[in-house]
Image (cartoon, rainbow, N blue to C red):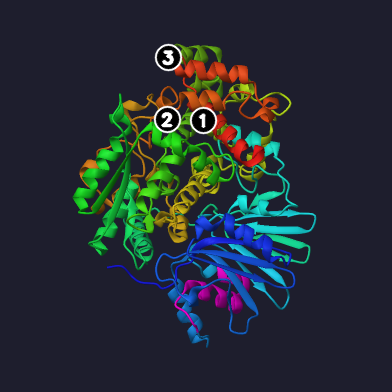
Amino acid sequence: MFWKIFYSSMCGINGFNLPEEATLRKMNTITRHRGPDDEGVFVSQQWSLGHNRLSIIDLSPLGHMPMFTKDKRYCIVYNGELYNFQEIKNELLNKGYTFRSQSDTEVILYAYQEWGTACLQKFNGMFAFAILDRKTEELFIARDRIGIKPLYYYHNNGQFVFSSEIKSLFAHEMIHKEIDYDAMNMYFRMLYIPAPYTIWKHIYKLKPGHFITVKGENVQITAYWSLTVAPDMVNDREYIEHTLKHLLTDSVKKQLISDRPVGVFLSGGIDSSIITGIMSEHSSNVNTFSVGFEKTAESEKYNNDFLVARKTAHYFGTKHHELVLSGEDVLSSLEQAVYHMDEPISNHIQAVNMLLAKYTTDYVKVVLGGDGSDELFGGYERYYYSDVIDRFQRVVPGVLRHNGITKRAFQTMRKSGLYTKINTAPGVERYLDFFAQKESLVASFLLPTYNRTTVLNDFFLDTYFSSVDEGNFTAQFMRTDVQTWLTDESLVRSDKMSMVAGIEQRVPFLDHRLVEFAQRIPIAYKLGTKGVHMNDVGHGYQGKKILVSAMKDYLPQFVLDQPKWGWFSPAAKWLRGPMKELTKEVLSPSYCPATADLFDFVFIETILDDHIASRGYGLNTLWSLITFQLWYKQYIEK
C-alpha cells in the first residue's frame, strides 16, 4: 500500500533582506517550473520571502506558503520532504501544540519554535528552508545533511539573497554577472564546481549539513552535521546485513509517502533493482521507467542496462515504461538542459535525465532513484584501485616501485598511467589523479592568462585532505566523494533535471541513518574484485559486496550476473554524427566572441577533428567546452 500525507512541499524558495515585492515576484516567476501549482509572497519590514509550490497531491489553502505560526511570529518557506514528520508532530502534540494542517511544513515551523536550531537533529528528509522570526527580523536557513535539495545565496555589500536556483538571483539588478575564474578552473578540471563555490563571484552554495543565520548585516554559517570517521566500526557481518536491510527497507517505505502512484528510475543495476523489489512488496501498482538509445552500431553496449531493466520489471511485475532516444532528441534538448543546471556542470546524460523526467511526468509525480549507493558501499572501480595501491605500497618498498626499470616495464605494457598511480601517496594527489582532468590537457585549451594550476589542489588539500587517514585512505576517498561529487554533480543534476519537468525525485540510499551506518562498515566488506579483469579498466568490477549480500532477496540472479558497467550513452558517437555540426559551431571563436580570450580555439579544433576522425577520444574535454559555451551564451551574452 501507499501511505498518505496531505500537502506536499516540493517547490522553489526565494528571499532577500529588503522589503520589495516586485523583485520577489520576478524571482518566483523564474523558479515557477519548480512549483507551477501555487505561488506565495510575504514582505516584512526587512525581508521578502517567496515560494513556488508543486502539488504532489492535494492542493489545499492550508498548505499554502509562506506559512505562519498561530501567533504570526514565525514564517517559513520550504522545499523538501520530511519523512519522519509524524513522529515529530506527535512529540509536539504531547507538548501542547495544535496544528491546522496535515503538512510537514507546519511540523518544521513548530519544531523550530520549540527547539530552535536543534530541531535539525530530529529531521529525517531532504530539505532547504528559511524561517523568519518577525519579532527579531532574524532569518534562519538550513539545508539537509547530504545536500539533496539545493540552496544558493548571494552575500555582498550588506545584501543577502537566497534561492533554490541561481538564475533567480539575477532578478536583482545589484547582482552583477561576474565569473569567478578560480571556480572556472575547478570546473574544467573536475567537470563540476565543488561547494561552497559557484561559477559566479559572491554567489555560493550552502554546504550540506549547514545552516545560516542572518540578522542585520551579520551572517553566520554553522555546521550541524558532518560525515566523519566512525569511532565504532562493526565487524559482525550478520549484524551488518540485518541492519542494512532494516534501514534501507524502512527508508524506502518512508519515501513511498504519496497520494499518487510512485515510480522508480530503473537502470537495470543493483541499486534501482533493490528499490524496485522493496516497493513491490508494499504495492501492486509500481511504475518503473528506463531510458535506452536507438539501434546503431554498438547499441548493445549502450543498452545493456536498458535490456536488463526490462527483465527486472517483468520479474517484479511492474508497470514498465521505456523511452528510446536518438542523438537528435538529445541535440534538441541540450541548451535547455544546460540552462536549467544554472552553472557549467559537464555530464553528457543531463539532457537524457531531463527527457526521461518529462516522459515520466505523464504517469507519476514522484520517483525513487538509486543515487548514493556507489559512494557509500564501494560501487566505483576507482575505490578498488585505490585500495589495491594502498596494499601494494605497504608491501613493495618505494625504491622498487619508483625507478626507471619499473617505469619502462609499465610503458612496455602500455600502462604508464598505472605506474603513476601506484606511486601516488594517499591524499589529495591520489584523489585528483583518479578524478581530475590532466593538467597538460587543460593547459592545451585554457589560455595561460586564465589557467590557474594550483587552485584545485589547494582547495581539496585545505578542505578535505589537510589530514590523511593513511591506514584507511580509500574510506576517506569515498567520504570525500559523498561530500563533493555526489552533492555537487549527481544530486544537483537529479534535482534540476527532474524539477524542470515537475517531478520529485527521492533517494532512499541517502537516508542519513543509512549514510551514518555505512561509515561503520569496514572497507573490506564493501569492495569487490576484478579477477582476470585486473588490468582492464572499466570492465569486470563487482563491488558493494555487503549490500548485495544483505539485499540478495531483492536481486534476481540475472542482475547479479551483470558486471558494473556505469551508465553509458553514445555521446562520443553523437559528436561524430548528429551533434557534429552543432559542436563545430559552438566550439568556434565566433559563437561567443568574449570567450576567445579564454580558449585556444585552434587547439580545440584539433581535439574535435581527432575525435571525429577517431584518431583520439576527446569526449570529456569537448563536452566540458560545449557545456561552457552553451552556458556562457545563455547566461552572459543574452
Query: Callout 2: few (<14), some (14-19), or many (20+) C-alpha neighbours within 10 Å?
Result: many
Q: Position of residue 560 (x, y in %)?
A: 26, 42
Q: Nearer the viewer, residue 434 or 326?
A: 326
- The range drawn in magenta is 99-120
Mark 3 secondary-structure assignment: loop
Sequence-wise first label, 1 or 3: 3
Label the magenta part by its dominant secondary structure. Answer: helix
Give the camera-side residue of 238 and 18: 18
Q: Which residue is mark 2?
A: 571
Horizontal placement of 484 versus 180: left or right?
A: left
> Which amino acid, by three-letter code, is at mark 3?
Met
Please tell me which residue is depicted at 61% across the width and 28% down the height of the picture.
Answer: 591
Q: Give yes or no for contact between labels 2 and 1 (Cβ–Cβ under 8 Å).
A: yes
On the question of residue 550 being in view, the answer is: no
Marked residue nearer the N-terminal end (2 or 1): 2
Residue highlighted by disc 3 = 413
Q: Nearer the viewer, mark 2 or mark 3?
A: 2
Q: State the separation of the CA atoms marked 2 and 1.
A: 9 Å
Q: CA distance from mark 2 to mark 3?
A: 29 Å
> 601 above or below 214?
above
Q: Tag 1, which secondary structure? A: helix
